[in-house]
C-alpha cells in the first residue's frame, strides 16, 4: 500500500479513526489485479476491512431490491453454498437480493465484499449499517468515491462496473426488464466475465430480466454446482463442499387431508384464491384461512394481486 498521505483532510480523518481503514491506489501492491484490467479502473479505493479479500476468486450476486421471498432465499442459499466453496461473494449492500447475498456469505463463514455508490464514511440504506460492520469484519466494504460523497442516483451504475469487474462471474437473481442488475450483467459481459441468471416463472415480472439475459447468452443456472463447474477451474482452489443437510420445516399439509388436497393444487406458478377453490372443491373462506397457515409455515408465498405460489 502506498505511503502517500491522502490529499483531503476528510480522508485523513477517516483513515485515522480505525486500524481497519485503507486507501489503496492503483499501482499499490494491495490494488486488485482484476479491477486493473477493466476499461476504466478506479484510481483509488477506500477500503474498510481486509484488502486481501479483493484478491481472492469472487462471484457477484445481484438482483432486485424488492425480491419475492423465494428470490431472496435463492440469493442467500447460493451465496452461502458458493461462499463455503471458496468464493468471495461480491454485491452492492442494497436492500433485497444484495442484502441476502451478503448475509448468506456471512452465514457460511465466507468473505464478502460490498461496493458502495457513495463515500465510505456512510451506509446507504441506513438499515444495513449493522450488516456493513459485519462485512468489514469478514471481508471488505469498498468505495471509489471521496469521503463525504452522498448517495446519488448516477453513482450507483458507475459502482456496478466494480462489482462485475472484481468478479469472475455475475449471477443475477430476479430482475425486472429495466433494472440496475442488468447494467451490472452487461458490464460483466463487456469486461469478459461470465454472466449467469436464474430462470423463474413466466408470471413473475422479476423473472423477465433474467429470461432476457438467458436469451442474450447468459448461462442458465439451476444449482450452485452449475457455477462451480463453470468457474472452478479458473478460480483454482474453489471446490464443491458436501451439501449441507436441509431440514424441511413441518407443515400442516403433512398431516391434514384438506391441507394436502389444497397444497396439491399449488405450484410454482402463481394462482388466485378463486382458482384454488375451484380446483380443490373447498370454499373460498376455507382456502383463504388455510393459505394463511401455509404461509406462516413457510410452504407458500403470497405474491402481488392476491396470488400464491409454492415456496418449498
Image: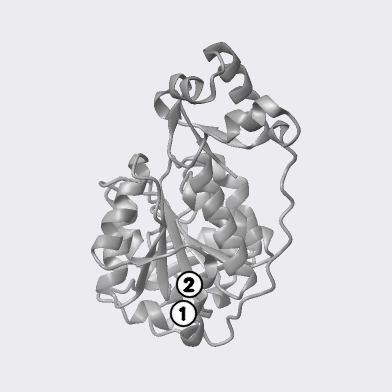
Q: What number is the disc on residue 155?
A: none
Looking at the picture, how far across and down is residue 202, in whole percent?
A: 34, 44
Image point 67% across, 63% down: which residue?
Answer: 108
Q: Name the residue under label 1.
A: 231
Image position, residue 97 (x, y; %):
48, 49
Q: Name the residue under label 2.
A: 227
Q: Quadrant of residue 26?
A: bottom left
Instruction: Point out residue 125 in the picture as x, y percentages from the top left corner.
Output: 48, 42
Determine crowd level at label 1: few under 14, some 14-19, many 20+ residues with C-alpha closer than 10 A.
many
Element marked by disc 1: helix
Residue 102 shows up from this direction: yes
User: Along the line of sight, which residue is nearer the eye, 214 or 41?
Assistant: 214
Q: Residue at x 39, y 59 (%)?
A: 146
Q: In which quarter of the image is the C terminus?
A: top right
Q: Do the residues labelled 2 and 1 touch (CB within 8 Å)?
A: yes
Tell me where residue 154 appears, x and y as whole percent.
27, 50
Amino acid at each position: 500500500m502506498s505511503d502517500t498521505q491522502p490529499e483531503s483532510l476528510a480522508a485523513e480523518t477517516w483513515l485515522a479513526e480505525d486500524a481497519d481503514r485503507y486507501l489503496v491506489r492503483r499501482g499499490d501492491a494491495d490494488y486488485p489485479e482484476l479491477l486493473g484490467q477493466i476499461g476504466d479502473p478506479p484510481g483509488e479505493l477506500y477500503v474498510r476491512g481486509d484488502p486481501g479479500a479483493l484478491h481472492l476468486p469472487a462471484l457477484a450476486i445481484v438482483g432486485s431490491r424488492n425480491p419475492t421471498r423465494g428470490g431472496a432465499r435463492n440469493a442467500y442459499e447460493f451465496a452461502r453454498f458458493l461462499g463455503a466453496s471458496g468464493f468471495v461473494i461480491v454485491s452492492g449492500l442494497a436492500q433485497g437480493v444484495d442484502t441476502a447475498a451478503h448475509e448468506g456469505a456471512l452465514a457460511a463463514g465466507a468473505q464478502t465484499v460490498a461496493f458502495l455508490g457513495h463515500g465510505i464514511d456512510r451506509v446507504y440504506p441506513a438499515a444495513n449499517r449493522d450488516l456493513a460492520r459485519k462485512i468489514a469484519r469478514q471481508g471488505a466494504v469498498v468505495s471509489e468515491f471521496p469521503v463525504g460523497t452522498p448517495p446519488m442516483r448516477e453513482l450507483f451504475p458507475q459502482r456496478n462496473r466494480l462489482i462485475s469487474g472484481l468478479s469472475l462471474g455475475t449471477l443475477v437473481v430476479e430482475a425486472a426488464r429495466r433494472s440496475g442488475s442488468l447494467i451490472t450483467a452487461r458490464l460483466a459481459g463487456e469486461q469478459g466475465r461470465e454472466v449467469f441468471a436464474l430462470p423463474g416463472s413466466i408470471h413473475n415480472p422479476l423473472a423477465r430480466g433474467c429470461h432476457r439475459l438467458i436469451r442474450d447468452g447468459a448461462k442458465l443456472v439451476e444449482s450452485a454446482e452449475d457455477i462451480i463447474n463453470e468457474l472452478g477451474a479458473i478460480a483454482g482452489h474453489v471446490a464443491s463442499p458436501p451439501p449441507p443437510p436441509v431440514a424441511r420445516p413441518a407443515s400442516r399439509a403433512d398431516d391434514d387431508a384438506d391441507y394436502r388436497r389444497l397444497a396439491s393444487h399449488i405450484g410454482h406458478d402463481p394462482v388466485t384464491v378463486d382458482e384454488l377453490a375451484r380446483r380443490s372443491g373447498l370454499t373460498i373462506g376455507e382456502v383463504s384461512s388455510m393459505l394463511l397457515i401455509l404461509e406462516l409455515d413457510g410452504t407458500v408465498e403470497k405474491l402481488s394481486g392476491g396470488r400464491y405460489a409454492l415456496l418449498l
